[in-house]
Amino acid sequence: MLARTTYDWNGAPAGYLETVEEAVKNTKMLADKYKEDDMVTVIPAPHSLHAASIEMIKAGHKLAKELGTCFHIHVAEEPFEVEQVKKEYDGLTPIELLDKIRSENRTWK
C-alpha cells in the first residue's frame, strides 16, 4: 500500500504543497500508473487535521471511494495537534471533528 500524502498547509515544505485539485489529479495519476500491479495499491492520504484543510480531507475521502481503496489520515498524533484542533473547532477533539465532517457530508460513510 502506498499512502499518497497530501498537504495544503503553509507550514509544509514547499515541494509538498498542492491545491486540492492538484492533489486529486496527482493521486489519480499515481493510482493509474500502478492499477495493473497486484503488489501496489495507491490510497489517498491527507496528512492530518493540522496539515490538510477540511476540503483536502473531504476530497481525499471522495477519491478513496472513487478508487475503491482505503483512506489514510493521521489523527491526534501529537498533543499539540489535539490542542490546535480544539482551539480552532470549538473544543472538538480530532475524532469529534472528523465525525462532524462525516455527518455533515452525507456521502461520507
Image (tube, rainbow, N blue to C red):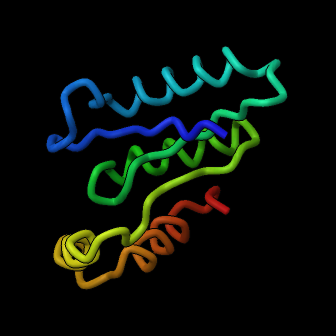
On the image, the x and y values in percent for residue 35 come to: 76, 21
Which quarter of the image is occupied by the C terminus? bottom right
Q: How many labels does the image show?
A: 0
Instruction: Identify the residue shown where x is 64% and y is 56%.
Output: 107
Left or right for 24, reference 36: left
User: Which residue is at the front of the view, 103 or 80?
Assistant: 80
User: Which residue is at the front of the view, 109 or 83?
Assistant: 83
On the image, the x and y values in percent for residue 84 come to: 19, 71
Instruction: Identify the residue shown where x is 48% and y is 50%.
Output: 58
On the image, the x and y values in percent for residue 4 come to: 51, 35
Left or right for 64, reference 37: left
Which quarter of the image is occupied by the N terminus? top right
Left or right for 88, reference 28: left
Instruction: Identify the residue shown where x is 27% and y is 58%.
Output: 50
Seen as rendered, the residue at the extreme bottom is 91
Using the image, determine if residue 21 lies above or below residue 96: above
Using the image, determine if residue 39 lies above or below residue 80: above
Left or right for 87, reference 72: left
Q: In which quarter of the image is residue 76?
A: bottom left
On the image, the x and y values in percent for residue 88 come to: 19, 70
Instruction: Identify the residue shown where x is 20% and y is 72%.
Output: 80
